[in-house]
Amino acid sequence: MIIRKTAGELEKMRRSGLLVWEILQKLAGMVEEGITTLDLEVAAQKMMDDAGARPAFKGYYVPAAGEKYKYVLCTSVNDEIVHGMPSAKRVLRSGDVVSVDTGVQLDGYYGDSALTIPVGEISPETERLLRVTRESLELAIGQVRAGNRLFDVCGTVERHVTSNGFSVVREYVGHGIGTQLHEEPQVPNYIDRKNENPRLKEGMVLAIEPMVNAGRPDARVRPDRWTAVTKDGSYSAHFEHCVAVTSNGPWVLTRP
Ligand code: MF3
Ligand code: CO
């Protein structure tokens, strides 16, 4: 069942969304050669504490990993797609890209967002990967309106990515969000005809999160049981926003 939110609930989700946005902006400003992904984790933890927010990811049980996640951020560098773990050993270097994904719970409601940040000078092809992934999210956001269907959102990401010569990851998907971090429906970055194709209605909230590989779509999980990487070693990008269906069209909760 897809849970629709009232105007009052959306206001609460807005507060979570704006906090996540603020945290990601701050982290993006910190990224430079020489800092570690654990530096980002520590800064994010402090911002959540200061705001009185509960981290959405820390303590979240993921069956595939068989344990709870231990950090407030996922920091995925270069060929890491998602669920990279912050580490003092992961020093960022010019030419790297780091995807930072985080979520909070405030007053019972979740916000969840991600962006991929370049470190120093990145190659033109990596620049293009980030641009196309960001564009695919923006185009998908434009489809979040009452009367459209879920596949309009999913297919828009897929079409933009593949027509630009990149590939969408199939193992990880976006999701509904509300009082749970992950609610129905699943929001794949491709049309999955095994799934239903519900009509979008006012009050639905989707976390849309294209994960895009420069090379082949195939993913594998490292022996740490968390870090998803591209099989071919190509770079991967990830952007995510929470978007509500309103009578005025899409409302991106995770940015001003
Ligand atoms: N990044 C995932 C999402 O956007 C959730 C992370 S799972 C966790 O839905 F265990 F890492 F927290
Ligand atoms: Co998400």
Image (cartoon, rainbow, N blue to C red):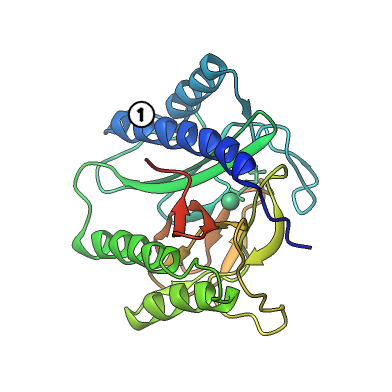
Q: Nearer the viewer, residue 249 or 175?
A: 249
User: In this picture, is 239 found above or below 163?
Assistant: above
Q: Residue at 40% across / 43% down in the picture?
A: 255
Residue kind at label 1, given as amino acid type: Lys
Q: Residue at 29% across / 39% down in the picture?
A: 93
For residue 233, say whether it is visible: no
For label 1, count other residues whose C-alpha is less than 10 Å away and answer few (under 14), some (14-19) or many (20+).
some
- Name the residue that disc number 1 marks: 26
For residue 169, say whether it is visible: yes
User: In this picture, is 219 found above or below 50?
Assistant: below
Question: Left or right of 224: which side holds 116?
Answer: left
Q: Quadrant of the C terminus?
A: top left
Q: Position of residue 102 (x, y in %)?
A: 53, 39
Q: Position of residue 189 (x, y in %)?
A: 53, 70
Q: Residue at 64% across / 80% down in the picture?
A: 192
Q: Quadrant of residue 53?
A: top right
Residue farthest to the top?
A: 50
Q: Residue at 51% across / 17% down in the picture?
A: 46
User: In this picture, is 46 found above or below 176?
Assistant: above
Q: Quadrant of the N terminus?
A: bottom right
Count the numbered circles shown.
1
Is label 1 in a helix, a strand or a loop? helix
Q: Position of residue 163 (x, y in %)?
A: 35, 83
Q: Nearer the viewer, residue 239 or 37?
A: 239
Q: Position of residue 28 (x, y in %)?
A: 33, 36
Q: Quadrant of residue 138?
A: bottom left
Q: Is mark 1 within 8 Å of ligand 1?
A: no
Question: Left or right of 14: which side holds 40?
Answer: left
Question: Left or right of 22: which side holds 181?
Answer: right
